[in-house]
Amino acid sequence: MKVEIYSDVVCPWCYIGHARFARAVERYRAKGGEVEVEFRPFQLMPDAESTGELTRVWGAKKFGGAERAAQMFERVRGVAAEDGLVLDFDHAIHANTFDAHRLIQLAVEQGKGEEALYALFRAHFTDGLDVGSREVLAKLAADIGVEADLDGADGAAAVQEQLARARALGVSSVPLFLFEGQFAVSGAQPEDTLLAALEEVAERTGQSPAARAVKAAKAAQGGADACDDEGYCAV
C-alpha cells in the first residue's frame, strides 16, 4: 500500500502525526501488512520570510497577542509531550520552508528521506535552529550524509511540482495522509485511528494479508483475479 503524507516541517501537528503514523505502520507491518510511505511537501506559509524572528514573537502577532499564542503553543506542546516529542516554542524560529523541502527531496532520492524529515523537525522544534537558513540546512545534510547543493537549484523543480500537485488536490491543511491516491485522513489522528485506516484501506483494495493469501492461492491454481494554509495546522 502506498501512503503519501503531506506535511510541513514547522507544523507541530505534522511532527506529532508523523510520529503516530510511524508507530501505526510498525503495528500494521507486524501483522503482515506492507506499506510504502512517500513524503510530500506542503508550505503552510509560502510567503514567510526567514529573518530569524522567534516563533513566539510571530505567534503573538498572528494569534492576537502573546498570552493567546502562549496558550495555543502550550496546548500543542503538552500533546506532543504525551507522544514523547519535545517542542520548544520559546526558541523555535519562524522560517520559510521551501529549502527544507528541497533537502527532504534530495534525501529521498538518496534513500534518507525519513532521516532528513525527522532531523528537520528536531532542528526546528527542539534545537531552535533556523530551518530557513541554507547554512543550517547544509550542516543538517552533512550530519545525515546527504549530498545537497542548496545554493543551486537541486531539488527545486521536484518540490515545485509536488507543491502544485498539492494545490491541485485541494490540500489546505496538514498533516494529510493519502492512501493509494484515493482515501484521505486529515490531521494528527490517534495511533489506533491511523492503524484502523491502514487496515480498512487494505481491505477495500484487496491488500490485507488475508486477501493477498487468497489471491496467491488462486494464482497457484491458475485462476487469480483481481493543516490551515495560513498558519499552523489546527494549533
Image (tube, rainbow, N blue to C red):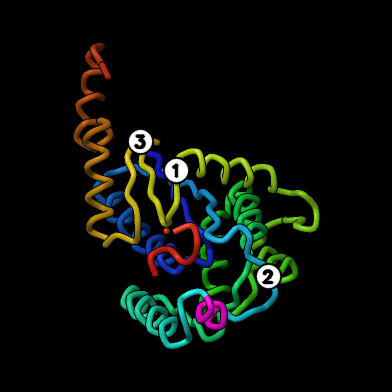
Name the residue type under label 1. Gly
Q: Give the residue drawn at x 56%, y 73%.
A: 124
Q: CA distance from mark 2 to mark 1?
A: 26 Å
Amino acid residing under circle 2 = Ser
Residue 64 position in % (x across, y down): 46, 79
| Disc 1 target residue | 170
What residue sits right under mark 3 in the picture?
182
Left or right for 76, reference 219 = right
Foreground: disc 1 or disc 3: 1
Give neighbour class at mark 1: few <14, some 14-19, many 20+ (Cα, 10 Å).
few
Residue 58 is a magenta residue: yes
Question: Which label's residue is closer to the chain start, 2 or 3?
Answer: 2
Label 3: few (<14), some or many (≥20) within 10 Å?
few
Figure quadrant of residue 228 = bottom left
In this orientation, which residue lies closer to the viewer: 173 or 67? 67
**Tag 2 residue:** 50
Measured in 3D between alpha carbons, the distance from the residue under mark 2 to the one under mark 3, in whole angstroms, is: 35 Å
- Among the 4 quarters of the image, the one containing residue 80: bottom left
Characterize the magenta stretch by its predominant secondary structure: helix
Q: Amino acid at mark 3?
A: Gln
Judged left or right of residue 192, residue 60 is right
